[in-house]
Image (cartoon, grey):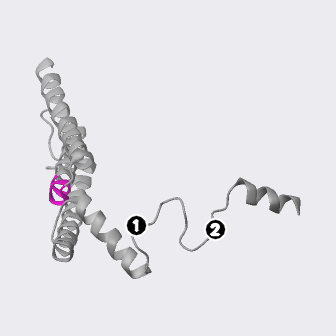
Amino acid sequence: MSMVFDLQWILYTGAIGLIAIGLVGIIWSRHLFRIILSLAIAEAGANLMLVIAGYRLHGHAPIMVAGVWPEQMVDPVPQAMVLTAIVIGVGIQALALSLAIRVKEAYHSLDIDEIRAAMQADIDAQAGVTGDLSQEEPSGREVIGPTVAAEEGRS
């Protein structure tokens, strides 16, 4: 029984490790393609965790053979959930990669900071403002401070 516990502990540790590696890659990476790969790694860890949850040592498929159910069966629900998650994950990854290709074509980079700056420049150009404006002062308007608000309250 201890061998089963050790195997499950190792598998759970591996699944949690994959999820952690994927999350760290998503949070710390500045490259769009690496973020997509990190998402795939985290998804693989989550799928492994679900498969482990339904695992039973010496378990059989829950199929009746010769009118008799197996004594110990594996849980088919986590397996079905993993199959569904794999299909959804492939779709999400395909969409993310196609969007990354479009971003690369438009901004000639996959670095998030460069993309953000280029997108902000495009938004500023379409809005007709320059990027030199202060973040505190609206364009062409008076700044509303405590003195203006206090005068409105008195009148």
Residue 91 in the image, given as x and y percentages of width and height: 21, 67
Which residue is identified by label 2?
Answer: 142
Query: Which quadrant holds residue 56?
Result: top left
Query: Which quadrant holds residue 95?
Result: bottom left
Q: Quadrant of the C terminus?
A: bottom right
Q: Earlier in the sequence, mark 1 or mark 2?
A: 1
Q: Quadrant of the N terminus?
A: top left
Residue 2 visible at all: yes
Q: Nearer the viewer, residue 100 or 73?
A: 100
Q: Nearer the viewer, residue 70 or 130?
A: 130
Image position of 57 (left or right of 145): left
Query: Which quadrant holds residue 15?
Result: top left
Q: Residue at x 72, y 53 (%)?
A: 146
Residue 84 visible at all: no
Q: How many marks?
A: 2
Disc 1, SS: loop
Q: Residue at x 81, y 60 (%)?
A: 151
The outermost residue toward the top is: 2
Q: Residue at x 17, y 67 (%)?
A: 97
21 in the magenta segment: no
Segment colored magenta: 31-37
Image position of 119 (left or right of 108): right
Under mark 1, the amino acid is Asp
* Looking at the image, residue 66 lies above or below residue 10: below
Q: Residues within 10 Å of mark 2 (few under 14, many from 20)?
A: few
Residue 98 in the image, given as x and y percentages of width and height: 18, 72
Residue 132 numbered mark, or none: 1
Q: Residues within 10 Å of mark 1 (few under 14, many from 20)?
A: few
Q: Residue at x 26, y 54 (%)?
A: 81
Disc 2, SS: loop
